Image (cartoon, rainbow, N blue to C red):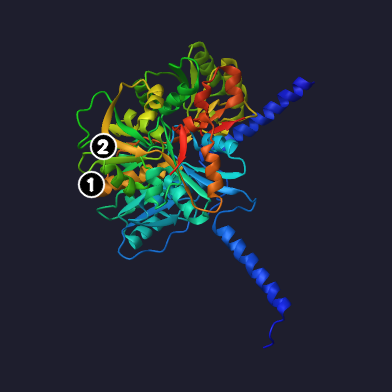
Amino acid sequence: MEASSPAIRTTRRLWLLCLAVALSLVGHGVRADGRVSLYVYLPLDVSPRALAKGLGASLPGVAITVFGRYKDFEKATEIDHPDAVMSLRPVLEARNLRPALQASIGGKSSETYVAMTVGYLRTLSGKPIGAVDLMGRKDTARFFAGFLSVKDPKVIWVTKTEDLLPLLQFQTAEAVLLPKRSVGSLKSKSSLDLTVTDLASFEVGLPALAFTGPGGSAIGDGVRRLPRDLNLLIGVDRWQLE
Amino acid sequence: MAARVNAAGRIIAALALWLTACATLHSASPEPPPITITDASRRPGLPVILVVLPVTTDTYDVWRGLRDELGDDYDIVTLHFDATTTPQGIGNAIAATHPMCVVLMNNPTVRAYEQWQHASTLTGFPPTVVLMASFLSDLNGRIANAAGIAYEVPAITMFVNMRSFLDRPTRRIGVVYRQPLHTFIENQRTLAAIENIELVPFAVGAHPSTRELDSALRRLRAAKVDAIWVPNDNGLFATRDQLVHAWLPNLKAAKLPVAVGVRALVNAQVPFGTFAVVPDHEAMGVQAANMIVDLASSGWHADGKVALPISVKTILNVPLARELYRLREDQVSRLDFVVQ
């Protein structure tokens, strides 16, 4: 076999370098259009369409994908390796992602959950309870079990906060669990006698942002400057470095 | 001349809408299957859930929801149902896989399974969850050991969603329906009352003429209702004449919000439906998974009950809605899709 000339070796090295750069970019979610990517999963009262529109207008140059279902978010994140992911803090933690930015409202970085029932309900024990699946059926059950003083709760999982109301209307659930901030929206839609009970110490971390690729830090800069209206849509008023 | 061209254009658009609506009412997904469903490899020792379905975009979404929820604990085995599938073909799949539960999607699949059960000499059948089949109220007498989720979005869900973004009182909703659906409409009336909404029904015969439909719609317009609901019943749109000469002129004259259960009827070209509420198919898969988890905890005994679908997607024709009435703009962001 002939030894390659220095010129050929240099060309090969350049090609290998290009290939390595290309592979690293593919691995870290830089898209064909050169934009960095942000994947978002936030169970909110607004549709993923509206959230994507708001984030898109505030984060130019960032390709934003908003997921309405945890499983889709989980799979896409594993396959696509976006530059950053935004979700509730416990969702990021369940995926072993370290938040780089944490959102808060009124200086508090968690939100209180409440139980909503039709009329007064003495106890949740033994009753079917509706809740939004935050991080997969089993992990959410484990997470919620830590807060509920109920043995073996029978939980009916839904994918959206708005789906909690039909559970009560159709008497599929006797109580539903939801963040306090969503109470007004559900109550405003219904004529039912909806009663809200605070659940002591049921606090769930607010949205956070984790950097998962080279463009993450730039996305973080943009997220810290999100406009007030959009932050309120997300249910927060400030983003700060962890 | 311009007006005549405009009118002709509207009639052509109306015909297109009629064809689309009929196709959509007959089948949830008229388009050819764009996807293939491939099962993961079987894992020894895991129980099986056998899913029988025709491959459409909608059944795929339900299947995906089901697989994502239950795929860790069960092997999901899929039997693709098509024109060549026989009732015995379903029986053979059951014999081969010994499923803990069978999931059936769509009317022909349910009919074939029903035929297989009736012809079978077996004394016991695996529990069956029926999805995406029309008017399931008689499930208990048809299939042994079955439960299901109704495919029709409950009227209460439509009305509550519609009420939330209309900046006007929405208390009385008018509906024209065919007499064979009387029980269904009465059930919807009872449900709507939970949310203080009065359903005002006007019946027509089983095979209404255009004139009969027109007359019922005129009576509905005179009844001072706040909105109109058009149920998913292709018998109300059996001919293009009914659409062009009964529905369209009456809906136009009514100047009221019109709630429909078919996305194609909320259309930028033809002012038919203002607002559509359709099933959220992925979420239906999640609801079916809840049902299967329940079956597992109750010793795999199905009680014949038919649950109402919980999750929906909402579509609003924004220009048409804004032309007719004021919207609560803060609520528009909650809609899943808007037609501009």
Query: How many numbered markers are drawn?
Result: 2
Q: Residue at (44%, 24%) from the top-left corner?
A: B159
Nearer to the camera, B258 or A174: A174
Residue identified by numbered label 1: B298
Amino acid type for the residue under numbered disc 2: Pro
Q: Quadrant of residue A126?
A: top left
Which residue is farthest bottom? A1
Residue identified by numbered label 2: A128
- Between marks 2 and 1, how big is the CA–CA gap? 14 Å
Q: Is residue B110 left or right of residue A3?
A: left
Q: Is residue B113 left or right of residue A63?
A: left
Q: Is residue B28 visible?
A: yes
Quadrant the C terminus of chain A occupies: top left
Nearer to the camera, A101 or A166: A101
Q: Quadrant of residue A175?
A: top left
Q: Position of residue A44 (x, y in %)?
A: 44, 35
Q: Is residue B247 left or right of residue B67?
A: right
Amino acid type for the residue under numbered disc 1: Ser
Q: Residue at (25%, 41%) from the top-left corner?
A: A154
Q: Position of residue B166 (x, y in %)?
A: 50, 20
Q: Residue at (63%, 70%) from the top-left corner?
A: A16
Q: Secondary structure at mark 2?
A: strand
Chain bearing tag 2 is A
Q: Secondary structure at mark 1?
A: loop
Q: Position of residue A116 (x, y in %)?
A: 30, 29
Disc 2 vs disc 1: which is toward the camera?
Answer: 2
Chain bearing tag 1 is B
Q: Is residue A5 left or right of residue B315?
A: right
Rendered position, B302 above or below B95: above
Q: Position of residue A2 (x, y in %)?
A: 69, 87
